[in-house]
Amino acid sequence: MTTSSQKLSVWEKIGYSLGDLAANLVFQTLVTYLAYFYTDIYGLKSAHASVIIATVGLIAAFAFNPIIGALADRTQSRWGKFRPWILFTAIPLGIVSFMAFSTPHFSYEGKLIYAVITYALLLLFYASNNLPYSALSGVITGDMAERNSMSSYRFVAVMFAQFFVQVFMLPIIIYVGHGDKSDGIQTLMSWLAVIGTVLLLITFLSTRERIVPTPEQKSTLKQDLKDLSGNRPWMVMLVLTLLIFITLAMKGGAYVYYFENYVDRESLTSFISPLLSTFSELGINFFGNEPVSAGLGLFNAGGIIFMIVGISLSKRLADKYGKRDVFGIALFISTLFILVFFLFSRTAVMWMFLSQILHGFFYGITIPLLWAMIADVADFSEWKNNRRATAIIFSAMMVGLKAGLSIGSALLAMFLGLFQYVPNSALVQSDSTINGIKMLVSVFPATSFLAGGILLFFYEINKKVEIQIERDLKKKRSAD
């Protein structure tokens, strides 16, 4: 195993983080608006949207990711194992991102076919780009403190992407489409496709791979899978990732329905009016006078701003107490501020915003830790088996991510159908529908978060083990 200096420049950390900014312009759109796009903009029935999201998403999760992980681990090029994938998928990912959120004038059956094809292509190119990108974090440096620092840079970038999508995207869609959401989302996605492609190219140019397996290290896919099957921390992180992204997809996608169909518009308008007046004085007018899109954007903004505050504290806490313990405590507290949404009345707008802010802060602490812990699992595998298979370990986590996204979004669409949700008809929703929407932003997503917190009791890489792994691998790599 050959290495060079493990210290990273600020420029390389920023350059690496721009890749996740690009990826999350796509990913956060899927989390926040995929079900809404299919039901309220594209015009699919809830049941059909649920089947497409679940079927295509699960096939992609369990087929695309392991294959790409195995291929990436066996890639040999002058740019390394993982950077070439970022380079050659940047443009295709931009193109299919635009196509997946386009609204061609097909028959209903044609729309279904188009949705299946474009969603499958989007997930294929997303996996081909983001899985090697994620695995790159495991070979840029073997220094765990530097890895924690890089993860913090990375997830500040994630938060900027999330901030844009969840705060500004719906108002901009309405603004640039002149009230037509179909035209608006196509225009906006064309801009994001270009921006994302440029950012990925910057990531390729600004990073390099320092941890390079020696030529004599060879393993078959069967050996890699056998190593994984005996790696309990990997199993824990796989299921934890699945549960976390079920929650994120379900509650993230449900908020737009919650604001459109439950939150009292008069109370919301009264609460956000001072903020909108301030924005208007600053020349920011695309929020318009529509309280739902403006209120949802500002609601998400509060959570994201305090997520960034949580991210900024994450490294310091993890360095002192260990990733596992900090993750578990912060995840549990953040879950409590999801549960309380079931108790809020329609007019309790201030409490909704406050709970979102507190949830965002504590969940933000966990965000950099998830991927840093997966990189630690790759180190654990090398430490235990004397072989490094970074991409296949990350591919397993991407299976959890994609499966969680698919299951969470599909459950959202399925429950909306079961609760007899009527698209674009806020005035005719039944009491059972409203109650179901409340459950979709509270009890249902909180359940999978709590299960994830319990799982961490079985994750054995605590602070003491982290230090031992890092020390032993440094000694081994310097000897090779």
Image: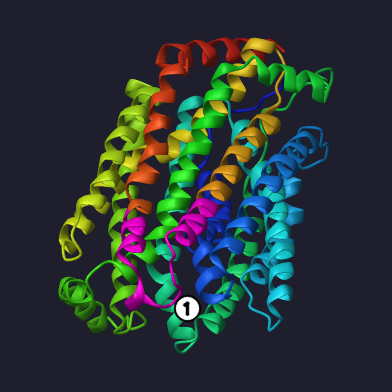
Mark 1: which amino acid? Ile
Q: Is residue 217 left or right of residue 414?
A: right
* Residue at figure coordinates x 64%, y 33% from the top left: 396
Dominant secondary structure, magenta? helix
**In the image, is residue 466 above or below residue 46?**
above
Residue 177 point in image, percent of width and height: 50, 86
Q: Which residue is mark 1?
A: 173
Q: Considering the numbered disc 1 on the image, is that residue within a helix, a strand or a loop?
A: helix
For residue 414, above or below residue 286: above
Decide: is 121 above or below 386: below
Magenta region = 409-438
Q: Is residue 368 visible?
A: yes
- State which quadrant residue 26 falls in: bottom right
Q: Residue at x 50, y 81 (%)?
A: 181
Q: Is residue 420 magenta?
A: yes
Q: Is residue 285 magenta?
A: no
Residue at the image position 80 percent from the left and 37 percent from the top: 71
- Viewer can see residue 160: no
Split into 4 quadrants, where in the image is the C terminus?
Answer: top right
- Give the residue drawn at x 28%, y 77%: 291
Residue in front for this viewpoint, 313 or 438 = 438
Quarter of the image containing the N terminus?
top right
Q: Is residue 362 left or right of residue 108?
A: left
